């Protein structure tokens, strides 16, 4: 059967709730690898806000967001459609330069394009101060990502702390608030404020992620904690080394549960090396083997070969 080039996804406004968007978000890579059709979602303003908050990784893959307004509607009568600003904010992004992201997003546009985009979004927000929060979610979140990607950490921190985080609190969106807290911790870490970053992750982000049982957010937060501890020389301190091992162990287990191949490769190799360093060779072998298989699936043969070589050497020693 020939597959369609474009699939239009339609339904009532409540057809996709937060749980379904989150499930779609988790399975996005598997779907993208098997489905060759372009997906066109028909959503109202409320559903757009829900999708961008509940499936941020999937949302960042979008090629554009378009508003359709009848020309017969008198000027000023279509506030809900034009207030989103998506026709000017998103329609001009070339699909090949759209976001390709992890939980926190990676923008592949040039610095000049991103800088122009910052000006566009700021101008739109200034022109629409009374727009409802649901319609400002997408541009405000993108502005934070842009400032971060441009290395403007002071403005990015100010934006995340005093504009974006309060918005998600007003919306009672605990997941997006927790993600924003994680992004704040990331900025603080890059600015050298490791202690405050760890505090936010341990006291704000992880407890929120545990409450809502967001496995992807738990994994990312644990990985951030591990990175900060390693950068602070954590392996030289027995207590920190133990925490790093625990964080990696839980991250690896959750990534296996999610079947996240990229995470299994990255976290598994680090966890395996740490187990070997600590003398737990038997425990390290299956972890390194899984990580090596994941690198094979990611088509990174050099990394896979290194892990196979290490596994063979360790097996010889055990025998």
Image (spheres, helix red, strand yellow):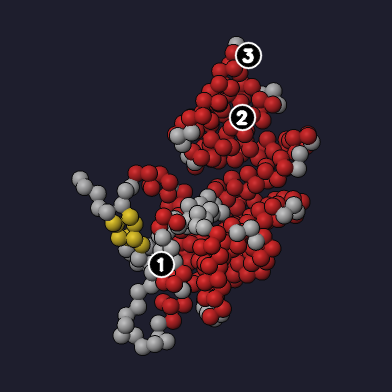
In the displayed structure, would residue 75 be above or below residue 53?
below
- 255 or 185, which lies in front? 185
Q: Is residue 176 visible?
A: no
- Which residue position holds label 3? 317
Task: Tell us which disc is closer to us: 1 or 2.
Answer: 1
Does residue 304 appear left or right of residue 211 in this picture? left
User: Where's residue 286, x and y in %?
Assistant: 55, 25
Dot 1 or dot 2, earlier in sequence? 1
Does residue 1 appear left or right of residue 59 in this picture? left
As drawn, the label of residue 91 is: 1
Dot 3 or dot 2, earlier in sequence? 2
Q: Please tell me whether mark 1 sits on a helix, a strand or a loop.
A: loop
User: Where's residue 83, x and y in %?
Assistant: 46, 77
User: Where's residue 104, x and y in %?
Assistant: 56, 54
Question: How many dots with numbers?
Answer: 3
- Which residue position holds label 2? 272
In the displayed structure, would residue 314 be above or below residue 95?
above
- Residue at the spot x=59%, y=45% of the render? 219
Q: Quadrant where the C terminus lies?
A: top right
Q: Please tell me whether mark 2 sits on a helix, a strand or a loop.
A: helix
Does residue 127 appear left or right of residue 235 in this picture? left
């Amino acid at each position: 059967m020939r597959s369609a080039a474009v699939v239009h996804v339609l339904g009532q406004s409540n057809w996709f709730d937060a749980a379904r968007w989150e499930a779609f978000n988790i399975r996005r890579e598997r779907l993208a690898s098997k489905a060759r059709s372009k997906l066109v979602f028909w959503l109202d303003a409320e559903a757009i806000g829900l999708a961008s908050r509940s499936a941020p990784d999937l949302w960042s893959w979008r090629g554009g967001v378009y508003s359709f307004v009848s020309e017969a509607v008198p000027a000023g009568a279509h506030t809900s459609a034009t207030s989103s600003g998506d026709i000017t904010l998103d329609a001009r992004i070339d699909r090949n330069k759209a976001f390709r992201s992890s939980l926190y997003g990676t923008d592949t546009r040039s610095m000049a394009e991103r800088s122009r985009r910052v000006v566009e979004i700021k101008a739109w927000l200034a022109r629409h101060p009374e727009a409802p929060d649901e319609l400002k979610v997408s541009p405000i979140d993108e502005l934070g990502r842009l400032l971060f990607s441009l290395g403007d950490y002071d403005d990015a921190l100010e934006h995340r702390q005093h504009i974006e985080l309060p918005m998600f609190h007003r919306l009672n969106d605990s997941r997006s608030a927790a993600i924003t807290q994680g992004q704040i911790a990331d900025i603080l870490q890059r600015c050298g404020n490791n202690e405050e970053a760890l505090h936010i992750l341990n006291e704000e982000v992880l407890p929120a992620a545990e409450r809502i049982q967001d496995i992807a957010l738990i994994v990312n937060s644990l990985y951030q904690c591990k990175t900060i501890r390693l950068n602070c020389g954590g392996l030289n301190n027995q207590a920190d080394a133990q925490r790093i091992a625990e964080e990696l162990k839980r991250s690896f287990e959750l990534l296996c549960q999610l079947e996240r191949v990229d995470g299994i490769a990255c976290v598994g190799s680090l966890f395996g090396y740490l187990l070997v360093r600590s003398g737990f060779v038997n425990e390290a072998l299956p972890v390194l083997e899984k990580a090596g298989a994941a690198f094979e699936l990611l088509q990174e043969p050099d990394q896979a070969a290194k892990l196979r070589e290490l596994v063979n050497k360790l097996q010889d020693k055990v025998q």
